[in-house]
C-alpha cells in the first residue's frame, strides 16, 4: 500500500513543480485547467489521509500498542462509546457499511469537545465533515488496503486492523488538541 502513497506524493510534487513553472512563465491557463486541478487535489488528499494512516499503525509484533488507550483519550472513549470495545464495534460497523471506497475515522470535535466516528468517501479527509474535526484514527477501507490478505472481505480486515493501531499516536494528538 505504500506504493500507492508514494504515487500520490510523486503526483503532488510533480503538480507543484508544473504549477511553479506555469506561474513563472505567466501561463494562467496551464495552471488552472479543471482536470489538472482535480487530479492534483485528489493526489494531495491521498497523501494527507495516508500520512495519518501510517502514523496510526504499529508493527503487529509490538504488543504494547494494542493496549487500551491511556489517559484522557481512554476516558473520552469510555464517555462517548462506553468502552474501547464499543468504539471498535462502531467504527468496524460503519467502515463495513461504507459503500465503495473511503475511510472510517475516529475524530475529535474541538468545538463540541467530544469524540465522533464518521466516514468519508474516496479520499475525502475528515475535515470535509466539519472544520472543527481533528482525525485521531483513520482506517483506509479502499479495497487496496486489504485485498491481498482479506480478498474482498472488508469486515475481516476491520476486525483485525485494531491489532496494529498505534494508540500512543492517537492519544498524543488528542492531548494536544484538547
Image (cartoon, rainbow, N blue to C red):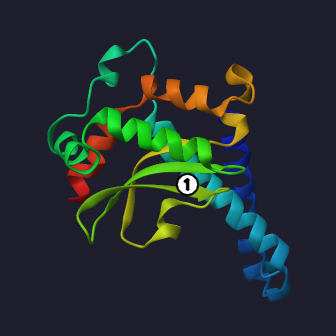
Determine whether, in the image, residue 158 is placed left or right of residue 78: right
Determine whether, in the image, residue 68 is placed left or right of residue 152: left
User: Looking at the image, can residue 85 be seen?
Assistant: yes
Q: Residue at x 43, y 43 (%)?
A: 90
- Density class for disc 1 (Cα within 10 Å; few <14, some 14-19, many ≥20) is some
- Report the quarter where the C terminus lies: bottom left
Q: Residue 57: x percent and y percent?
A: 46, 31
Q: Residue at x 60, y 61 (%)?
A: 124
Looking at the image, residue 163 lies above or below residue 101: above
Q: Residue at x 53, y 47 (%)?
A: 94
Looking at the image, residue 134 lies above or below residue 77: below
Determine whether, in the image, residue 141 is placed left or right of residue 144: left
Q: Nearer the viewer, residue 117 or 32?
A: 117
Q: Residue 79: x percent and y percent?
A: 19, 48
Pointer 1 residue: 48
- Report the quarter where the N terminus lies: top right
Residue 77 image-quadrant placement: top left
Number of on-image labels: 1
Q: Residue at x 72, y 38 (%)?
A: 143
User: Looking at the image, can residue 58 be seen?
Assistant: no
Q: Residue 95: x percent and y percent?
A: 56, 44
Q: Nearer the viewer, residue 98 or 128?
A: 98
Looking at the image, residue 96 lies above or below residue 129: above
Q: Secondary structure at mark 1?
A: helix
Q: Nearer the viewer, residue 87 or 140?
A: 87
Q: Residue 61: x percent and y percent?
A: 43, 11
Question: Of all residues shown, which one is farthest toward the top?
Answer: 61
Looking at the image, residue 140 lies above or below residue 70: below
Amino acid at each position: 500500500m505504500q506504493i500507492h502513497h508514494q504515487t500520490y506524493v510523486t503526483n503532488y510534487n510533480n503538480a507543484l513543480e508544473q504549477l511553479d513553472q506555469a506561474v513563472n512563465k505567466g501561463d494562467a491557463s496551464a495552471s488552472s485547467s479543471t482536470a489538472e486541478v482535480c487530479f492534483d487535489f485528489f493526489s494531495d488528499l491521498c497523501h494527507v489521509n495516508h500520512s495519518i494512516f501510517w502514523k496510526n499503525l504499529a508493527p503487529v509484533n509490538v504488543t504494547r500498542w494494542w493496549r487500551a488507550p491511556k489517559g484522557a483519550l481512554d476516558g473520552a472513549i469510555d464517555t462517548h462509546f462506553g468502552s474501547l470495545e464499543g468504539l471498535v464495534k462502531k467504527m468496524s460497523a460503519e467502515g463495513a457499511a461504507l459503500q465503495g471506497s473511503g475511510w472510517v475515522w475516529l475524530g475529535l470535535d474541538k468545538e463540541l469537545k467530544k469524540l465522533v466516528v464518521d466516514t468519508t468517501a474516496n479520499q475525502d479527509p475528515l475535515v470535509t465533515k466539519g472544520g472543527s474535526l481533528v482525525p485521531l484514527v483513520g482506517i483506509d477501507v479502499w479495497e487496496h488496503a486489504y485485498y491481498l490478505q482479506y480478498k474482498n472481505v472488508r469486515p475481516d480486515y476491520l476486525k483485525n486492523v485494531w491489532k496494529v493501531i498505534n494508540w500512543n499516536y492517537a492519544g498524543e494528538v488528542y492531548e494536544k488538541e484538547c
